[in-house]
Amino acid sequence: MSYETRPQAYDEAIKILEKKDHRGIAEFILPSVKEAEEVALEHTKLSVPDMREMDYLAKIKLNQENFILHIEFESAYRSNIEMQKRMLRYYTYIKWHNDLPIYQVLVLLKKPDNVKRIKNGINSRVQGLDVMRYRYGLIKTYDIDKYDVLAQKQVVLYPLRVFMKYDGESEEEHIQECLMVTEGLEDKDYYFLTLECIKRLYQKGKYEKFVKEEILMQSALYKDPYEKGLGEGIEKGRKEEKVGTIIRFLTKRFGPLPLEVKNRFPELDLTTLDVILDRVYEYKDLDEVKKYIQ
């Protein structure tokens, strides 16, 4: 049997963890969320041109205060500038769609190889004046003791223990222990998701001998619907979100759209929708849009 992973499998793993316990993920970031009156997942597929969808977006009501929690999980941190710009772009897109206060957090899963000091914000000054001070929270998963998660029984975080600190253990002992913890859970999806996280860090030779196929096959995620249907569903969802975003933007600019224009967008392919979306601020009138939907 091959345990090779698909390129998008890791991102799917994070999304599935959120669906299993989105409140638990929020509590990992903000422990005070345990007292929240409401934690509701928001739609994360905002169509940000040339960027992937957000990892986690939730509306939270805590002590009568409403705010948006946005989390990004990152295992391949390349540079401060790249991440700062990405987080700021996400912030502006969230703000465009929702006027609530936004609390952003970057969760670093793997310690960067080439960045010694992680910066989590931007200070902008012009002619001695403070133009902008922008900050987001930072959690370094690799500095968290993986056994603290076990002590607190934060099951939704068990797959992410792979990225956490493991003093006094070899890599192979660490891998084996992370798998053993999840193989005893009733929900075998956590075993599957732990393996997906392991694949993110280690080559097959490091973990293959520890994988128990009889447990892996008990996970619903192991079956064809995960490999095929979920991918098709994700693509369909992305298309629907792009269509919705285009309609909202054009309606704000030009008022209610004619039905013959509005009903044409769902029939277009993703490439054409991306072209329309990238130029949405440039159109002077609907006639310029219509040339894409003939």
Image (cartoon, rainbow, N blue to C red):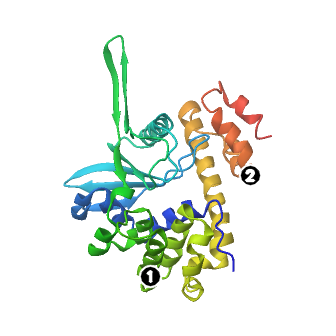
Residue located beneath label 2 in the image = 267
Quarter placement of the N terminus = bottom right
Residue at disc 2, secondary structure:
helix
Q: Is residue 1 left or right of residue 103?
A: right
Q: Residues within 10 Å of mark 2 (few under 14, many from 20)?
A: few
Residue that extends furthest to the left in the rendered view of this protein: 63
Q: Give residue 161's quadrant in the image.
A: bottom left
Q: Residue at x 31, y 55 (%)?
A: 60
Q: Is residue 2 above or below residue 124?
A: below
User: Looking at the rendered structure, which numbered label has been put on residue 180?
Assistant: 1
- Relative to the observer, which residue lies in front, 164 or 11? 164
Q: Is residue 276 left or right of residue 158?
A: right
Q: Residue at x 48, y 34 (%)?
A: 81
Quarter placement of the C terminus = top right
Q: Is residue 109 left or right of residue 255?
A: left
Residue that extends furthest to the top in the rendered view of this protein: 127
Q: Residues within 10 Å of mark 1 (few under 14, many from 20)?
A: some
Whichever of labels 1 and 2 marks the residue nearer the N terminus, that label is: 1
The answer, for residue 264, to whether it is visible in the render is no
Residue 33 in the image: x percent, y percent? 26, 60
Q: Tell me the amino acid under the disc marked 1.
A: Met
